[in-house]
Amino acid sequence: MKRAGYIIWLIIVLLFLYMPILMLTVYSFTDSESMGVIRAFSIENYKTLFTTPELRNMISGTFVLAVVSAVISVILGTSGAIGAFYSKKGAKTFIDSANQIPVVNADVVTGFSICILLIVVLNMKKETFIPLIIGHVVLSVPFVYMSVIPRLKQMDDALYEAALDMGAKPSAALRKVIIPQIAPGIFSGFVMAITLSLDDYFITTYTKPATFDTISTYVVNATKGAQTQIKTALWALSAVIFILITLAFIFMNMEPGKEKKNV
Amino acid sequence: MKKYFSRRYLGIPYMVFLILFVIVPVLVILYYALTNGEGQFTLSNLFGFFSSGYAIGTLVYSIFIASVVTLVCLLLAYPAAYILAKGRIRKSNVLLLLFITPMWINFTLRITALKEVLTAIEGNISYYPFLNTIIGMTYDFLPFMILPLYTTISKLDDTLSEAAQDLGAGSAKVFLKVTLPLSVPGIISGIMMVFLPAMTNYVILDMLYNSTFIMGSLIGSYFAAYDWHNGSMISIILLFIILLVNIVTGSFTDDGAGRRRAVL
């Protein structure tokens, strides 16, 4: 009895989380312009999505931005974490605390303050993409740092010392001893950086060039516009992303014996 | 010659980056908040905020909305997290992932989906602005509440509640006197992950019915009007609220680093 109640509660919450996106996926394969009126099966939305240059540029731009900012974040955050970990207490405390600022701060405030510094005070042009990339790195680099630090704590430092004693150069010891040991942390930091960049709206609006859009800023503008063709093409985009994530989810859980990480 | 290259030098680029793009921007908005267009020191932006009925109304309304959203998220998420952690459900770790996966879909796309569903149900979504605000934000932030709750509850020691039971407490009493107090750290980190974004994420409201009567949107509108000084003042006020919430809740959480999107 209790058990049935448990399952029902979980199903209710899951329905709330998934119903809208599932419905949208179904409707994206029809020619309806709003939910509730099913007319006929159609893949018109998908044709629009993959053939309209504006939409294609916006999607590829979003992903390029995510990868570029994630790569920079990984390099900066990993070296920062290694450096901080071996620093004296003062420097370590400073990096730790400054690292927390973007994490606890509201994205609106982070985006606005970066915009004021780079664009208003330093007069940097938004069209250079530099403010946008810096903004996205500020957003994600703290999470790389936070996922690398625990790995450094678990690491056996004697191996690094041993490598040096046996004549390895510090750079080689770093590459062949430290990096492999903290690689899982670097990887999850990278994935997190990608996710944060893809999901960001606020930092992007305050720092992006006027002619550039990411999925978030584009969708927000499109919901206000009256262009139904674009609106329903975005349903197709949601469906594609949803289906890809579902496939990734199934794939992850099919692999036998794979360790689940949920920190 | 030095034998060891000191690894701490690797931290220098990140330290410089943090100073330039995290600390300096905060100082710059502090400067802008306390000056006027001519660069003179003034507190008029601060007084302006507290004497404007609209601004104060927005602040109060955002706190109210954020509180309701946080409460609704907590009421939905706590039982779910408890069931996943202690309900002896098969494959509960896979199920937990299901609750978190929505975070990987862009939130503007998810809100678009919700908007279509609400329009289909309600006819015209502008008839129920308050209800839709709460639904929209709960929909977006719920996964962020479930994760910290699950982490805390799954670490609870079962022998404590068993001991309470053996000593004669009924199941309601065990929950109220043992389980609930012990899950406070998870509740607090969950609140942090939902309350602050709910006060500032004006895009959800903007998308649902083109209204933006919330703290974050004040920054947006000053930004659109090129009013850096008042925009900075709002940012500083928000930053102050965030700091306050962090200090108040900091003593309760296991790890302060918990906020938002700590997935994977």
Image (cartoon, rainbow, N blue to C red):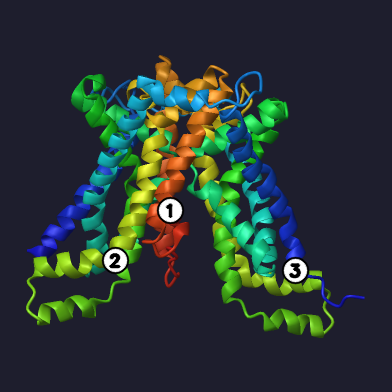
Q: How many marks?
A: 3
Residue at image position (21%, 54%) is A10
In depth, the one of B245 and A182 nearer the eye is: B245
Residue B115, relative to residue B85: is it above or below?
A: above
Q: Could you confirm whether marks 3 and 1 are on the same chain? A: yes
Residue at image position (64%, 63%) is A92
Crowd class of label 2 (few under 14; some 14 to 19; many from 20; radius 10 Å) = many
Tag 3 and tag 1, C-beta contact below 8 Å: no
Provide the secondary structure element on which disc 2 rests: helix
The residue at which mark 3 appears reads as B7
Crowd class of label 1 (few under 14; some 14 to 19; many from 20; radius 10 Å) = few
Three-letter residue code for mark 3: Arg
Q: Chain under label 3? A: B
Measuring from the top left, give residue A203's x and y in whole percent: 55, 35
The answer to which image quadrant residue A259 occupies is bottom left
The residue at which mark 2 appears reads as B153
Nearer the observer: mark 1 or 2; the answer is: 1
Residue B247's mark? 1
Provide the secondary structure element on which disc 3 rests: helix
Tag 1 and tag 2, C-beta contact below 8 Å: no
The answer to which image quadrant residue A124 occupies is top right
